[in-house]
Image (cartoon, rainbow, N blue to C red):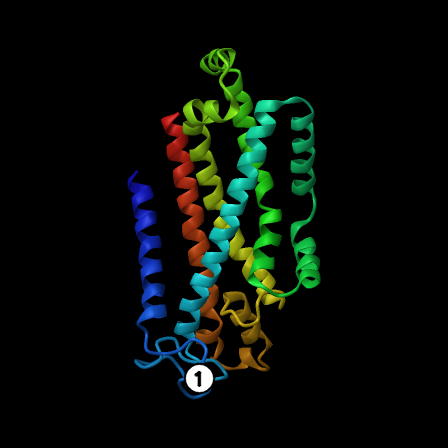
Amino acid sequence: MKRIYAIAFALVLLVLLFAWGLLFYPMDSRLPSGGSLEAPSAEHWLGTDNLGIDIFAQISSGFFHSLSIGLATALAAFLIGGVLGVAAGYAGGRTDMLVEFLINLFLSVPQLPIMIVAGAFFGQSSLNIICIIAAFSWAPIAKQVRARTMSLRKSGYLVLARSYGGGLWYLFKTHMSRDILPLLAISSLAVTGRAIVQESSLAFLGLSDPLAKSWGLMIARCTAFKGIYFTNFWTWWLLPPVLSLVLSTLLLRLLTRALESYWLEKE
């Protein structure tokens, strides 16, 4: 538990830092507030980009943009994967065969190329990005939930409850939820981290909302700047969004692994 608390505390500190940057930091994330490519200073903590827009303000805004997409994607994957996984594991037969086919199909196709094609086809908007990423995020959750439901279905107390006329909703609410919901929550947390990386990847390729302050878009603008690596501008323009992306996803991944270990130990 100490490991979980330590990682969660670090993640909360990161959220509070970027929340302060979004709400109370005096510089705007959309409008120029200084000269072009100013070095970090007391006024501009991480300097400015080529348009004179403060880097820290952009990173703070980008964090909550990426986090909102990650959480929305995780919620969609939670609902789709949970419902299909429970239905397939409990019903069996043709329902199980159909869901298993869909799971294997979405797990086998190359995700990023299809995401790129879908993003280019459906257009640049945050809602489209959420739908595209969620479409490839539910299958791992459904696979785990299906396997867990199949093992629970054979347990004695569930067989007895079903013999007395217990329906699926009653059985899930009374007997299955305490085993399945923690699995769903941990799997959805893992989806959040992956969705942040995938959204940044699509933004880097110019397939996300161009008006949103995304870390991927910041990185793309920096790397497209001619001669960026022949100057020291990259140290405050490129490194901060890259490190923020790595740190955020690393903390989410570590928290997911810690929760998995704790849950397995309790079992």
Task: Point out the residue furthest to the bottom here.
Answer: 35
Residue 159, given in percent of the width and then of the height, sits at: 50, 13
Residue 179 quadrant: top left
Horizontal relation, residue 12 to residue 89: left or right: left
Q: Secondary structure at mark 1?
A: loop
Give me the residue at 49% from left, 27% from top.
169
Q: Nearer the viewer, residue 88 or 196?
A: 88
Q: Nearer the viewer, residue 164 or 202?
A: 164
Visible residue check, residue 179: yes
Visible residue check, residue 243: no
Q: Nearer the viewer, residue 248 or 27?
A: 27
* Above or below: residue 234 compared with residue 144: below
Residue 120 quadrant: bottom right
Residue 139, given in percent of the width and then of the height, sits at: 60, 40
Q: Which residue is mark 1?
A: 32
Quarter of the image with the C terminus in it: top left
Give me the residue at 54% from left, 79% from top.
228
Give me the residue at 61% from left, 28% from top.
88
Residue 178, given in percent of the width and then of the height, sits at: 41, 28
